[in-house]
């Protein structure tokens, strides 16, 4: 069966909407699947889905729309390519998106070691969050989406988004205090 032809209208809209969102898409996919190469495949699949959809779909808010496609592509990819008993979360390296200063040199070796240990503990704590909390935290604190945009991207009510974000942050605080 051949793929339907995507016309120039869809290609033009794709060029306007998707490329500026690829970094956020990759970050989300990498957190979900924990692997950079797999995240690239997921974003590519999401981009293909978006290209096909843009021929017939009107998009008012592109970022939550595309990140919803990325999230769904990642969940589909994980279900098909990962064992069922494997929990997924993000890759620790993406936490630099939250605080780029973590990669800068510290004034002395002791401070550098403390910062490294703290960063690793935070990365591990985020990676241990269950999927709905992880997705919400990444979309809010790394990708900068509003509660409304996260609700649209995940299909959850805004109150659920706020609850998930609060639970994710509380879990991180509890883990980091221990």
Image: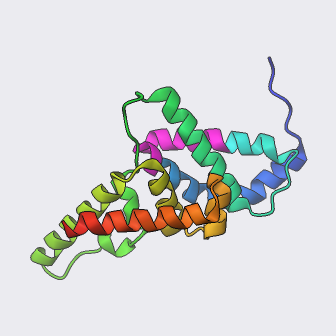
Viewer-proximal residue, 162 or 44? Answer: 162
For residue 80, say whether it is visible: yes
- Up-down: is 79 above or below 73? above
The residue furthest top is 1
For residue 19, say whether it is visible: no
Position of the N terminus by quadrant: top right
Residue 168, position as x, y percentages in the image? 41, 62
- Up-down: is 22 above or below 97? above
- Up-down: is 105 above or below 91? below
Q: Residue at x 44, y 51 (%)?
A: 31
Q: Is residue 29 left or right of residue 11?
A: left
Q: Is residue 42 magenta?
A: yes
Residue 88, position as x, y percentages in the image? 40, 42
Secondary structure mostly seen in the magenta stretch? helix
- Up-down: is 132 above or below 37? below
Q: Residue at x 46, y 47 (%)?
A: 32
Q: Is residue 108 magenta?
A: no
Viewer-proximal residue, 42 or 164? Answer: 164
Viewer-proximal residue, 119 or 165? Answer: 165
Q: Residue at x 25, y 63 (%)?
A: 175
Highlighted magenta segment, given as a residue range: 31-46
Q: How is the image coloured?
A: rainbow
């Amino acid at each position: 069966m051949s793929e339907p032809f995507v016309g120039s209208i869809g290609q033009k809209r794709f060029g306007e909407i998707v490329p500026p969102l690829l970094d956020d898409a990759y970050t989300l996919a990498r957190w979900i699947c924990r692997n950079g190469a797999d995240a690239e495949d997921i974003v590519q699949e999401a981009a293909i889905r978006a290209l096909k959809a843009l021929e017939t779909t009107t998009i008012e808010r592109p970022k939550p729309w595309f990140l919803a496609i990325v999230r769904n592509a990642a969940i589909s990819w994980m279900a098909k390519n990962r064992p069922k008993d494997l929990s997924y979360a993000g890759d620790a390296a993406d936490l630099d998106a939250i605080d780029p200063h973590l990669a800068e040199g510290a004034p002395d070796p002791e401070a550098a070691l403390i910062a490294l240990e703290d960063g690793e503990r935070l990365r591990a704590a985020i990676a241990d969050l269950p999927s709905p909390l992880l997705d919400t935290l990444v979309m809010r604190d790394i990708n900068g989406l509003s509660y409304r945009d996260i609700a649209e991207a995940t299909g959850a009510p805004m109150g659920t988004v706020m609850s998930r974000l609060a639970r994710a942050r509380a879990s991180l605080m509890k883990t980091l205090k221990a």
